[in-house]
Amino acid sequence: MDVQKYVLPFEACDREMVNRVGGKCASLGELLKAQIPVPPGFAITTDAYTEFLNENDLSEKVLQRVSSLQPGNTDQAEEASQDIRRWIELGNI
């Protein structure tokens, strides 16, 4: 298993990786490159998230739940968010 596919230290992150590690982790990597102190840490990549969803048969379930939302209905969006979070927390890996 290629651990760097799933987990990267902040030092390995930069603005070119926003889609892979998110904006906050990419920014922390940029701060480190500028020699600005940042607490030690790491990023979990979108590859890890995608594999987790696939391994737990959640990808299609999440897409179906999200596609049923009506634009502007924040109560419905909150309920969907809670459902998806619960499914992820019950995952096997």
Image (cartoon, helix red, strand yellow):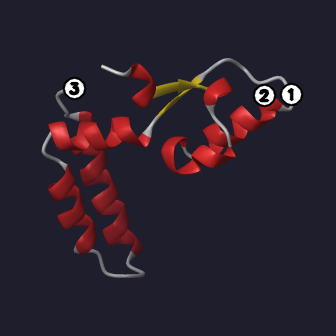
Image side of residue 78 versus residue 17, left or right:
left
Residue 47 pos. (x, y %): 37, 39
Instruction: For marks 2 and 3, give the one nearer the viewer.
Output: 2
Image side of residue 9 versus residue 45, left or right:
right
For label 3, count other residues whose C-alpha is less than 10 Å away and answer few (under 14), some (14-19) or many (20+).
Answer: few
For label 2, count other residues whose C-alpha is less than 10 Å away and answer few (under 14), some (14-19) or many (20+).
Answer: some
For label 1, count other residues whose C-alpha is less than 10 Å away and answer few (under 14), some (14-19) or many (20+).
Answer: few
The reply to whether discs 2 and 3 touch (Cβ–Cβ < 8 Å) is no
Residue 55 pos. (x, y %): 16, 37
The reply to whether discs 3 and 1 touch (Cβ–Cβ < 8 Å) is no
In the image, residue 55 above or below residue 2? below
Report, in whole angstroms, how far the alpha carbon at label 2 lies from the one at label 3. Answer: 31 Å
Q: Which residue is mark 1?
A: 36
Report, in whole angstroms, how far the alpha carbon at label 3 lies from the one at label 1. Answer: 35 Å
Instruction: Kindly identify the residue that appears in the image at 18 percent across and 66 percent down.
Output: 64
Placement of the N terminus among the 4 image quadrants: top left
Residue 33 pos. (x, y %): 80, 30
Q: Give the secondary structure at mark 1.
A: loop
The reply to whether discs 2 and 1 touch (Cβ–Cβ < 8 Å) is yes
Q: Give the secondary structure at mark 3.
A: loop
Q: Which residue is mark 3?
A: 93
Q: Which residue is mark 2?
A: 32
